[in-house]
Amino acid sequence: MIEVTHKDALTFRLDGDNKLLAVYEPDGDKVTLDATAVREILAMQNQSDLFLDEKALSRLVQTYNNSNAGFILEIGERRDGEFIIKVSDDKMTAWLTMTPAYGGAPVTFDQIRRSLQEKGIVSGLITSAEIEAVLKEGRATDYIIAQGTPAVPGLDAQFHSLVPEMQERRPQINEHGIADFRNLGSLILVKQGDPLMRRTLPTEGKNGQNILGQILIPKPSRNTPFTSELKGSMFDPDDNDLLLSAIVGQPLLIPNGVMVSPTITVPQVNISSGNLSFDGTINILGDVMEGMKVYALNDIFVGGTVEAAELEAGGNITIKGGLIGNSDSSAASTLSMGGKISCKGSVSARFAKYVSIEAGTSIVIEEYSMNNQLTAMNQILVGKPGGKKGLIIGGSARAMMLIQAVSIGSDAGIKTYIQAGLNPHTQQQLDGIKREIETNEKNQDDIKKIITFIENNPEKDKNGLLDKARRTLDNLTTEIARHQADQESLLAEMSFAEYAKIVVEQTLCNGVEVRIGTQIWKAHEERGKTVFRLIDGKISFGS
């Protein structure tokens, strides 16, 4: 037993359980004691390496200084070094956590080695020198003592486009989540025999090993073949992993392959060429003249101007020049008699006037839109932000998510209708349903008058007229109820209006009507830069 004695009757000793005890037996005067003094006494007696409980030490000082009664307090202990080795659930990692010895025996290399053997850890161990360094440090927390080698999977079969321009025809998504359709690229053509895509074979993976020495087999790589939908393309006769163009046409990327859409090129479309209809892509080098019709299953490219013609495409329509329809004294007839452009993709042109344009995604006009009927399922962009060109004057522009122009309307107050936040087709359906309900309600009133008249004049009921009138009234009531249900269903589709906006970069003129969702706002004076949104069900606008 080791004892450490203060000059008065306070002594320190280790009991049989290696607990450090402070014993006080009153014996005359005593000096004031603090924690530092206790540590100094223990150091003088070579006991400073014992573990001290800070709370117990504080209690000792307080009890000693404030009481004259004797006491025995446990304030610490002699501790051996301890450690634990944890193994991850996937048996890929082992961590060592170690606490130092306090006057007791330190953790040894042999103890750690035996623990590793007991846990079956035989692979991925750190070196003996690294373990000795940790032991010398005396403590560790989640120190990686063994690390397995993961299996390395092989690469799946890869498909590499050999016509990089094909990627550029895909619209990019900007930081606001809006697709950029301003630059769709130009017409890309390949010749027969041109390389389109290379398929690289899958590679083998590499086995791994966990810390228990168990071999880990990598997931097999996938040997994905080219798709079977390879219209217009073929395999290289000497290399089945190389795809070539079988025809002259436009390459189109598809999953795991490339199709080549047949393409025809004509100098222009007029009376001499006749109307065109082609299950591929049509490349028109010059103009499309008035009254002509052009249909393409894929894209239409026009190098010149389209004059009061009809163009329809299953893909995009790109017009390097402008669109010019027939003008008339009234705006309504102008919109109905002008040219008509429709496609499932996007439409882009330098300018447009007196035409109807309907796009499955977006409409992009570089300079101006005058007295047009524009309808796009995503967005309408006229001009470029910060530029001077980009006017929408007269007519209408309808898109679901975004309408953006440099200026909208004119100093002359020409009526211009701008709508966002509604599926344009939904609005047309709603308008049609509203007309049907109004017509049926008018007919319903007329039938009610007939029924009332016959009921008041029974002698007029000939050939079952009253029964027929009542059946007609029932049918009209049922029809009105059906239309009202359809109307409610379509109105429920308008919830995305809160995400739509209309952006005017410079000037909004008098005579412009703005609609977002079902809310309407009319301009009665000129405004500068304005952004319209729907907030709390109301149109909000600011710069």
Image (cartoon, rainbow, N blue to C red):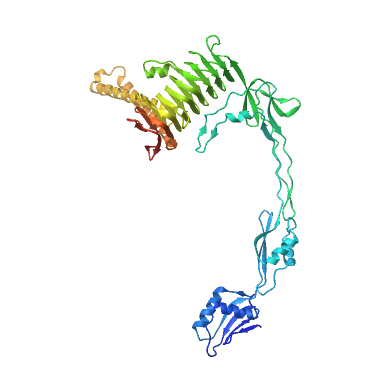
Residue 185 lies, in percent from the top left, at 57, 27
Q: Nearer the viewer, residue 206 or 51?
A: 51
Residue that sits furthest to the left in the current view: 456
Instruction: Report which quarter residue 534 is drawn in.
Output: top left
* As drawn, 154 above or below 147: above
Q: Residue at x 48, y 25 (%)?
A: 365
Query: Quadrant location of the N terminus?
Result: bottom right
Residue 460 lies, in percent from the top left, at 25, 18
Query: Quadrant location of the C terminus?
Result: top left
In the picture, measured across the screen, residue 530 lies left or right of residue 27, that is left
Instruction: Report which quarter residue 70 is drawn in.
Output: bottom right
Residue 170 lies, in percent from the top left, at 57, 30
* As drawn, 143 above or below 379: below
Residue that sits furthest to the bottom in the current view: 28
Q: Residue at x 74, y 45 (%)?
A: 206
Residue 519 lies, in percent from the top left, at 36, 34
Q: Residue at x 61, y 24 (%)?
A: 188
Q: Residue at x 75, y 57 (%)?
A: 122
Q: Let me know if residue 430 appears in the view.
A: no
Instruction: Report which quarter residue 315 is drawn in.
Output: top right
In the picture, measured across the screen, residue 276 lies left or right of residue 243, that is left
